């Protein structure tokens, strides 16, 4: 039975970010999500730069995503009593040794690799509202 990948906020001080630093091989994708109004947030852009450097050093695919409301809708409501979510930076982890076993993750990896071949190092996907 195929286990789904897991999404974790990657804020620098979060336990999930610390776990990713200890075991970067479990991280298969980094999503950096913004909306147009976030483009002027210098602190967020510096945060993104640091995360991108970590991902490049550890051969982790990076995907920029725009459309924060759609991303939140796709991820669903947080568990009752859970900490507030920061969806700007998400790490997708997969505990399997064959990390790209999931068809969806394999397609994203292929898209990221094709984008790098066209010198687009961090591809961007715009999520459309439904």
Image: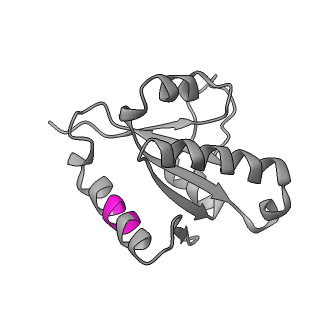
Residue 115 image point, x, y percent: 43, 72
Residue 70 image point, x, y percent: 59, 61
Residue occupying the far bottom of the picture: 118
Taking depth in this image into account, of 128 and 122 the one nearest to the observer is 122
Q: What residue is at 22 percent from the left and 34 percent from the top?
A: 97
Q: What residue is at 57 percent from the left and 56 percent from the top?
A: 71
State the scheme by which the image is colored.
one colour
Residue 124 image point, x, y percent: 55, 69
Query: Quick check: is 111 in the magenta stretch?
Result: yes
Q: Is residue 126 left or right of residue 96?
A: right
Taking depth in this image into account, of 118 and 8 the one nearest to the observer is 118
Residue 39 image point, x, y percent: 78, 64
Taking depth in this image into account, of 109 and 69 the one nearest to the observer is 109
Q: What residue is at 53 percent from the left and 69 percent from the top?
A: 125
Taking depth in this image into account, of 120 and 107 the one nearest to the observer is 120
Which quadrant of the structure image shows residue 103?
A: bottom left
Q: Is residue 66 above or below residue 81?
A: below
Query: Quick check: is 2 in the magenta stretch?
Result: no
Q: Which residues are magenta?
A: 108-112
Q: Is residue 6 left or right of residue 66?
A: left
**Magenta segment, principal secondary structure?**
helix
Tell me the quarter of the image containing the C terminus: bottom right
Which quadrant of the structure image shows residue 94?
A: top left
Tell me the quarter of the image containing the N terminus: top left
Q: What residue is at 36 percent from the left and 65 percent from the top?
A: 113
Residue occupying the far left of the picture: 1
Q: Is residue 75 above or below residue 69?
A: above
């Amino acid at each position: 039975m195929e286990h789904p990948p897991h999404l974790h906020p990657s804020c620098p001080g979060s336990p999930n970010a610390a776990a990713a630093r200890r075991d970067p091989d479990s991280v298969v994708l980094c999503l950096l999500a913004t909306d147009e109004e976030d483009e002027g947030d210098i602190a967020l852009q510096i945060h993104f730069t640091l995360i991108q450097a970590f991902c490049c050093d550890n051969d982790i695919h990076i995907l920029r995503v725009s459309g924060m409301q759609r991303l939140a809708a796709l991820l669903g409501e947080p568990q009752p009593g859970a900490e507030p979510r920061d969806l700007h930076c998400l790490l997708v982890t997969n505990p399997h040794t064959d990390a790209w076993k999931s068809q969806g993750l394999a397609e994203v990896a292929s898209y990221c690799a094709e984008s790098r071949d066209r010198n687009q190092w961090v591809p961007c996907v715009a999520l459309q509202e439904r």
